[in-house]
Each structure stands twice: as structure tokens, then as C-alpha cells.
Image: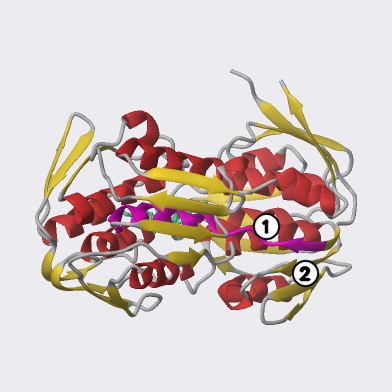
């Protein structure tokens, strides 16, 4: 199979302005939600990424017309021809699982394989299945496939033992057409949940509290098409901030919501970055000497995001001292560290704890992207290393970053693609 690599000549200070892409993790549940509308949804600021293309393929398979024009996607779900999603599409990405809630909400049946996605340790869907069952779905799990049947979701209160993002989304999607009120306690509070709530409300659902720990959804009989603009991608923003900071550069990010990045900007400031925020812009100037950060603990939002752990680590590899990370969301989210060591990074892992001792310099190496954010972290580190690096398997990076190489080139990075 053909592999494409990024070739990076490190050592260039990044400097300039970028316009932030729309959020992948918002666009995906919103595209699934479009299945609920007996009409046409127009979704703006939808990033052009391989995961989004997979979602459009799933929609097409279900019988919806899904067309992209630039960053606007139109989904016409007046006719649903199919309620089963082929394994080939389910395995391409984790968030395919949220089509379950949307299909149940719309048609009362859904059939799919277990979802794929980044290998970040065990990623069960027990919270999704348990909640859908509590809402009245009959679900069987046999031979690797999930089959679900239901009437309209029933009035209930779901208490999540962990604020899972995907499970919260699945509940909201199934509940949007519930017979009565569904309450979610200990719901995920991520901005992407709030965005999904807004989208559902525009379709005629009655969601309140999305973005807080308690969400109520009063189901509607019928949902209609609507128009919506996806929020900016806070994790892509964190990645470009780290790339600029790691190269002792400067960056201004336009079309950002600084409030969504509070825990990240806090860590970047602790390391010495100067950051100024406007309503929809953020500017960062890197320090001359990077200060280590004593403890970075990944937590559900508004805590420090697990999705930014790898890129912030890549930035702190050359800090003057020791930084400590604890990964509290996923069991296996340090796979990038073995690759970063090839650049000369000094990293020790003990279970969920990762100790990064800053080194004065990194040198270019051949590395392999093993997952999306870990892959982006390799690029951040390679940009700040001396000499040439090659990053293989960049399909992982392209699942989440639109025109990653062009965006970095625009900031002065020396990055090219090579087909192998
Ligand atoms: C979403 O994944 C994001 N994906 C992830 O982003 C992100 O890392 C994650 O939330 C946490 O913020 C999308 O939005 C498409 P979870 P999700 O359910 O929904 C456990 C990226 O890089 N859990 O909140 O899968 C689970 O194993 C991606 O863009 C259960 O035990 O995350 C994990 O340890 C990667 N049972 C924790 O909860 C369940 O039924 C958090 O998972 C569900 C989850």
C-alpha cells in the first residue's frame, strides 16, 4: 500500500497568521444528527478531513444525499433507505458509533459493527449501550455486530458513571425525538456537546444545559432541516500554538474561541509564552527559554484535554527542567513517546505518569505516526529539531488536520510530502 510521509527540515521559527479550521469533533456528531431531520441541513465550516469524508460516506449509504461545496455540506435526509452501516465504514473511525443514536431516533432501528478509531487503549462502548437500553432500545451484541430496535425513546434519567463525550452525544441524538424528557446527569461538558445541542435546537428539539453537567432533552415528534456553523477546532488551535512555541516563533490564530482553550493557554503561559486574546483571535509569542511545567493532568472539559497532551509534550521536550504529565482519560495515550525519543527526547513512563526531562536540542529522525494527535506531536517536535525528519503514516494526522502541511508552510515551516 502507498504511504505518504512528511519531510520536515527543522529549525525554522514559525511566524504568521492562520485561520482556524472547523472542529472535527463537532462536525462528526452534527453530521450524524442530520439523519434526524426530515429535511435538508446546511452545515457551514465543516472541515475537509478523511474522518468527515467517512461520515459523508455513511450518510450516502443510509440513503441521504450529502454534498460538499467548499466548507459547506448539505445533507438531505428526507429519505432513509438503510439502517445498517457496513463494517468497512464503522471500522474507519470511532465516532461512527454515534450514528446508532441518530438512526434509532429517526427510524427506531440501527445495525452496525463495533467502531474503529485511534488505538488509545481499550475504548468500550458500554456507557453508550447501557444508556440507549435505559431509554428503551432493545440491543443485541452478537458476532461483532450491534443490532438495536426501539420505539421513541422513553422518559428517563441517565446517570453516566463517567462524562463520556460519545455516550452523551448518543443519548442526545436518540432523545431528540423522545416521548417525554430525558435527563443526563454527569454529562460531558465539552464545547462540542454544546454545539450539538445548538444544532438539535435549530432542528426543533428542546435541549437545555448542553455544555454543563446536567442536560435535559424534551423530545419532539418531528425534526426539520436547519442551517448551522460548526465551532472552531480547539485542538487544532492548540497544535499550531505548540508548533509556533516549540520553534520560538509567533502566531496569530483567527476565528478561534479563546474561552475553549483556557486550560491549554494556562499551561502555555506557565511555560513562559505570552498570549493575548481577542473575541475571536489569539496571539502567542514563544519565550526565549521554555520553562518546564510541574504537572499537566488530562481531565474531562474544562480540564486539560487529553487530545492536547501529545502536542504540549512535544513543545516541552526542550524546556529547561522536568515536566510531568498524568493521562487520566485513555490508558494508552503515550505511544508517541517512543517516536519522540528517536529525536533525542528524554522521557520516562510509569503507568499513567510521564516524566519529560528537557534536553538542550533535538536532532531529526525517521518516525512513524501511530495515532492522530501523537502524529501531530511528532511534527511539532520535528519542526523544532535540528536537521531533517521524516514522518511516515501521515494518514493518521490527516484524519484531523485540514491541509496540515500547507498551514505550517504558510507560517514558514519547511515541510513537504513524499509518496513512498
Ligand atoms: C471523544 O472520544 C473524542 N472523539 C476524542 O478525540 C477525545 O479524545 C475524547 O472524546 C475525550 O475528550 C470524538 O469526539 C470523535 P469518551 P470518545 O467516550 O467519545 C471511556 C481526537 O483525537 N469510556 O469521552 O470516544 C473510554 O474508554 C479524538 O480527536 C468507557 O469506558 O471519548 C475513555 O477511557 C481521539 N465506556 C473515556 O471513557 C464507554 O462507553 C473517555 O472516552 C465510553 C467511554
Give the label, 1 or 2, closer to the camera.
1
| Sequence-first tag of 1 and 2 | 1
- Near mark 2 (Cα within 10 A), the count class, few <14, some 14-19 or many ≥20, is many
Residue 132: x percent and y percent? 18, 56
Res. 49 visible in picture: yes
From the viewer's perspective, tell me whether residue 399 is left or right of residue 20. left
Task: Determine which of the numbered discs, if any, sits on residue 239 in the image.
Answer: 1
Q: Please name the residue that numbered disc 2 is placed on.
A: 291
Residue 100: x percent and y percent? 26, 48
What is the quadrant of residue 265 in the picture? bottom right
Q: Residue at (25%, 39%) from the top-left corner? A: 81
Determine the main secondary structure of the stretch shown in magenta. Answer: helix
Vertically, is 313 above or below 264? above
Q: What stretch is highlighted in magenta?
A: 17-37
The C terminus, quarter of image: top right
Q: Residue at (50%, 41%) from the top-left corner? A: 53
In the image, 340 versus 57, the foreground residue is: 57
What is the quadrant of residue 60 in the picture? top left
Amino acid at each position: 500500500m502507498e504511504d505518504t510521509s512528511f519531510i520536515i527540515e527543522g529549525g525554522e521559527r514559525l511566524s504568521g497568521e492562520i485561520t482556524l479550521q472547523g472542529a472535527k469533533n463537532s462536525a462528526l456528531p452534527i453530521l450524524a444528527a442530520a439523519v434526524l431531520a426530515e429535511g435538508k441541513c446546511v452545515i457551514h465550516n465543516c472541515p475537509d478531513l478523511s474522518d468527515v469524508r467517512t461520515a459523508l460516506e455513511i450518510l450516502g449509504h443510509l440513503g441521504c444525499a450529502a454534498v460538499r461545496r467548499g466548507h459547506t455540506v448539505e445533507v438531505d435526509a428526507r429519505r432513509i433507505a438503510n439502517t445498517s452501516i457496513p463494517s468497512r465504514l464503522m471500522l474507519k473511525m470511532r465516532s461512527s458509533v454515534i450514528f446508532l443514536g441518530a438512526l434509532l431516533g429517526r427510524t427506531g432501528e440501527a445495525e452496525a459493527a463495533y467502531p474503529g478509531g485511534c488505538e488509545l487503549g481499550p475504548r468500550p462502548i458500554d456507557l453508550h449501550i447501557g444508556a440507549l437500553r435505559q431509554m428503551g432500545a432493545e440491543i443485541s451484541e452478537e458476532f461483532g455486530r450491534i443490532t438495536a430496535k426501539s420505539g421513541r425513546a422513553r422518559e428517563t434519567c441517565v446517570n453516566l458513571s463517567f462524562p463520556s463525550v460519545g455516550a452523551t452525544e448518543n443519548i442526545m441524538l436518540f432523545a431528540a425525538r423522545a416521548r417525554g424528557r430525558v435527563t443526563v446527569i454527569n454529562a460531558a461538558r465539552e464545547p462540542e456537546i454544546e454545539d450539538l445541542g445548538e444544532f438539535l435546537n435549530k432542528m426543533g428539539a428542546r435541549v437545555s444545559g448542553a455544555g454543563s453537567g446536567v442536560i435535559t432533552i424534551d423530545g419532539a415528534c418531528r425534526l426539520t432541516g436547519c442551517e448551522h456553523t460548526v465551532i472552531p477546532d480547539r485542538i487544532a488551535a492548540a497544535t499550531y500554538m505548540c508548533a509556533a512555541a516549540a520553534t520560538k516563533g509567533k502566531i496569530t490564530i483567527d476565528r478561534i474561541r479563546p474561552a475553549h482553550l483556557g486550560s491549554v493557554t494556562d499551561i502555555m503561559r506557565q511555560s513562559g509564552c505570552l498570549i493575548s486574546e481577542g473575541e475571536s483571535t489569539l496571539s502567542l509569542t514563544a519565550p526565549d527559554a521554555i520553562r518546564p511545567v510541574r504537572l499537566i493532568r488530562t481531565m474531562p472539559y474544562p480540564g486539560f484535554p487529553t487530545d492536547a497532551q501529545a502536542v504540549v509534550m512535544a513543545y516541552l521536550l526542550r524546556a529547561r527542567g522536568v515536566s510531568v504529565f498524568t493521562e487520566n482519560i485513555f490508558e494508552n495515550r503515550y505511544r508517541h513517546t517512543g517516536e519522540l525519543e528517536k529525536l533525542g527526547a528524554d522521557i520516562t513512563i510509569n503507568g499513567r505518569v510521564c516524566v519529560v526531562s528537557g534536553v538542550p536540542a533535538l536532532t531529526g529522525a525517521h518516525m512513524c505516526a501511530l495515532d492522530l494527535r501523537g502524529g501531530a506531536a511528532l511534527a511539532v517536535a520535528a519542526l523544532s529539531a535540528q536537521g531533517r525528519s521524516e514522518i511516515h503514516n501521515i494518514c493518521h494526522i490527516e484524519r484531523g488536520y485540514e491541509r496540515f502541511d500547507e498551514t505550517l508552510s504558510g507560517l514558514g515551516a519547511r515541510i513537504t510530502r513524499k509518496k513512498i
